Every structure is written in structure tokens, then in C-alpha cells.
Amino acid sequence: MSNRNDQTNITAALIVYLGLGSIFLGSIAFLFWVIPQYGLYSARLSGEAKLREAESTRQVRVLESKAKADAADLEAKAKVIQAKADAEAFAIIGEQLKNNPSILQYEYIKNLQEKQGDEAGERTVIYVPTQNGIPVLPITEASRLAPVPQK
């Protein structure tokens, strides 16, 4: 009987070892199938992520371009408005100068007085209108000056 018991134990052990071996080999075969599949899956996900990133980048560039175009358009409109305002201001100043030519003399004197208040050591350049090297003065100014003797 002990012989029969030994055979049964050996058969049972053999069945267990064959079962474990087949599980081990099945696991290895499964891994050989899963690893390439996972690589393909991972590559597909990576490609989709790159595609989404490229689409997002493209959308950002499009929005930036639209924003730049809008900003340029608004800047151009602002320049037109500023040019119209400048033209109106120059027209008003020109009309006032026609009606009051002494405004220029007043502004000239006022500017000279402001320049005298500058810090010491600064050099102030004053432009005097001349014609052939002779200062040009309004007739009212020239009449107050004594005639220059001719040599």
C-alpha cells in the first residue's frame, strides 16, 4: 500500500508542478503579448497628446495674431483721432496768431525768462532770426533802436 500511496503522491506532485509550470509559461506568453500591445497603446496616447498640444499651440497663435491685428487697428484709429485733434489745434493756433501777432513775441520773452532760471553752468542757446547775418527785428522794434552809423 505504501507503494500506491507513493505513486499517488508523486502523481499529485507532478500535477501540481505541471500546473505551476503551465501558469508560469502562460504568464510569460501573456507578457510577451501584453508588452508590445502596451507599447502600441502608449505610443498612440503619446501621439494623441502631441496632436492636442499642436492644436492648442495653433489656436494660441491664431488668437495672438487676431489680438495683434485688433491692437494695430485700434492704434491706427487712435493715430487718426490724434491727427484730427492736432489739425484742429494748429488751425486754432494759426487763427489766433493771425489775429494777435504779438503772441509770438510774448511767448519768446516768456521762454527767455524761463531759460534764465535754469541751473548755473547750463548753456542756453537762443536763436535769433537773421537775414544775411543781420538780425531781423519787427519794424516797431527797429524804430526804437538808434541808427547804426555806417563806416
Image (cartoon, rainbow, N blue to C red):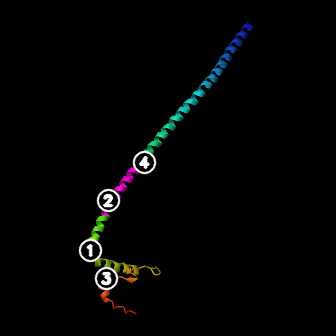
Q: Nearer the viewer, mark 1 or mark 2?
A: 1
Crowd tier of the residue under label 4, counting other residues whose Cα lies within 10 Å: few below 14, some 14–19, many 20 or above? few
What residue span does the magenta drawing correspond to? 65-85
Up/down of 103 relative to 39, above or below: below
- Distance from Cα at disc 1 to Cα at disc 2: 26 Å
For residue 138, the mark is: 3
Query: Where does label 1 land, which residue?
Result: 98
Which badge, 2 or 4, comes first in the chain's sequence?
4
Circle 2: residue type: Ile
Which badge, 1 or 4, comes first in the chain's sequence?
4
Q: Nearer the viewer, mark 1 or mark 4?
A: 1
Query: Where does label 4 land, which residue?
Result: 65
Is 28 situated left or right of 76 in this image? right
Which badge, 1 or 3, comes first in the chain's sequence?
1
For residue 81, the mark is: 2
Circle 4: residue type: Ser
Q: Main secondary structure of the magenta part?
A: helix
Is residue 74 located in the magenta-colored stretch of the structure?
Answer: yes
Closer to the camera in the image, 67 or 90: 90
Which badge, 4 or 3, comes first in the chain's sequence?
4
Question: Residue lying furthest right in this view?
Answer: 3
Question: Residue lying furthest front in this view?
Answer: 151
Circle 1: residue type: Lys
